[in-house]
Amino acid sequence: MARRWAGGGVRVVAGDPSEAARQSVADVAEVHATLPELVASMAQPRVLWSMVPAGDPTQAVLDHLADLAAPGDVLVDGGNSDFRDTMKRAWVYGEKGLPLVDVGVSGGVWGLENGYCMMAGGTGEAVEKVRPLLEVLAPAPDTGWGHVGPSGSGHFSKMVHNGVEYGIMQALGEGFAILQAKKEFGYDLAQVAKVWQVGSVVRSWLLDLTAEALAEDQKLDNVAPVVADSGEGRWTLREAIDLGVPAPVVAAALMVRQASQGHGDYSNKLLAQMRHAFGGHAVTHE
């Protein structure tokens, strides 16, 4: 993100506790080891953008920035924070005269080249101050980003976006697993993926990434079957339940991810014991 900003003519002042992280952008940004140094080096009014993991790290960074900032500055949380936390923070910082803009950011490592998709939440006045930065990060100034609503709405929409992502990824994974299991047809999975990429109703960027992965290695012998769950799928499902909105695909995809992390091992062992108890089915011992 720092590189895309710098390439668009934005003066970037960056900070991180890690020397390696600071040096990684030292060629395009003015870097500082501490937040007081960083904030002091910027002329007011400032846009102070936090891009750290959700939870305690985000809370600590934003609280520190709020203590260092002055009225007229704008705080931005570009991480995947829980929207409920965002709404609370917006009220607390707003009482100090510091508006908070929550920006849900999608695009991953490809954002530098392709631009980022961004959903911004906050007051119109605050988002307007951040607009020049959003226009540089986006694929085009008027494409791929939007002011989607009040404080919390940016992170809420990104949360739902990630829940949808869970479902699409799960469907692709299951589909290619079924093809791979049909040994009699001897599918070249990379070929099938390439065919699907053009003209198909399931064509997508995630399919493109899947096709690249399969072209490189179809067996995936060196990849552990563990899929991380960073939280957004859980939050999406929680909201679906609270709102009374059925979301079986997101729920199933989340459960599969959690099972891949070993959380389903005990229940599966117990199921095996049940089958043995009522039907005399064999139990496989480790």
Image: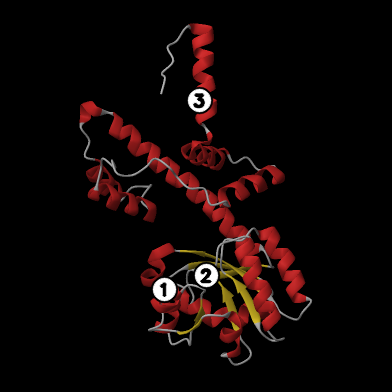
Please report contact status of discs 1 and 2: CB closer than 8 Å, yes or no. Answer: no
Q: Which of marks 3 and 1 is nearer the N terminus?
A: 1
Q: Where is residue 160 in the image (x, y as percent from the top left)?
A: 58, 53
Q: Nearer the viewer, mark 2 or mark 3?
A: 3
Which residue does the numbered mark 3 point to in the structure image? Answer: 268
Which element type, helix, strand or loop, lies under badge 3? helix
> Mark 2 or mark 3: which comes first in sequence?
2
- Considering depth in this image, is 273 or 245 the residue closer to the camera? 273
Q: Can residue 197 be seen in this view?
A: no
Task: Using the numbered discs, state the Cα–Cα distance from disc 2 to disc 3 in whole angstroms.
Answer: 44 Å
Task: Locate residue 175: give its quadrant.
Answer: top left
Q: Which of marks 1 and 2 is nearer the N terminus?
A: 1
Q: Could you tell me the amino acid type at mark 3?
A: Asn
Across and down, in percent, residue 148 comes to: 62, 66
Q: Is residue 179 above or below residue 241?
A: above
Which structural element holds mark 1?
helix
**Would residue 128 be found to the left or right of residue 200 on screen?**
right
Q: How crowded is mark 3: few (under 14 residues within 10 Å), some or many (20 or more)?
A: few
**Front of the two marks 3 and 1:** 1
In this figure, which colouring scheme has been used for the structure? secondary structure
Q: What number is the disc on residue 168?
A: none
Within 10 Å of disc 1 (Cα), the crowding (few <14, some 14-19, many 20+) is few
Percent of width and height locating residue 283: 44, 15
Q: Is residue 74 left or right of residue 134?
A: right
**Residue at the extreme right of the image, as rendered:** 95
How crowded is the residue under tag 2: few (<14 C-alpha within 10 Å), some, or many (20+)? many
Nearest to viewer (mark 1 / mark 2): 1
Residue receiving disc 1: 20
| Number of the label disc, if any, that sits on residue 145 | 2
- For the residues labelled 1 and 2, the Cα–Cα distance comes to 31 Å
Q: What element carries label 2?
A: strand
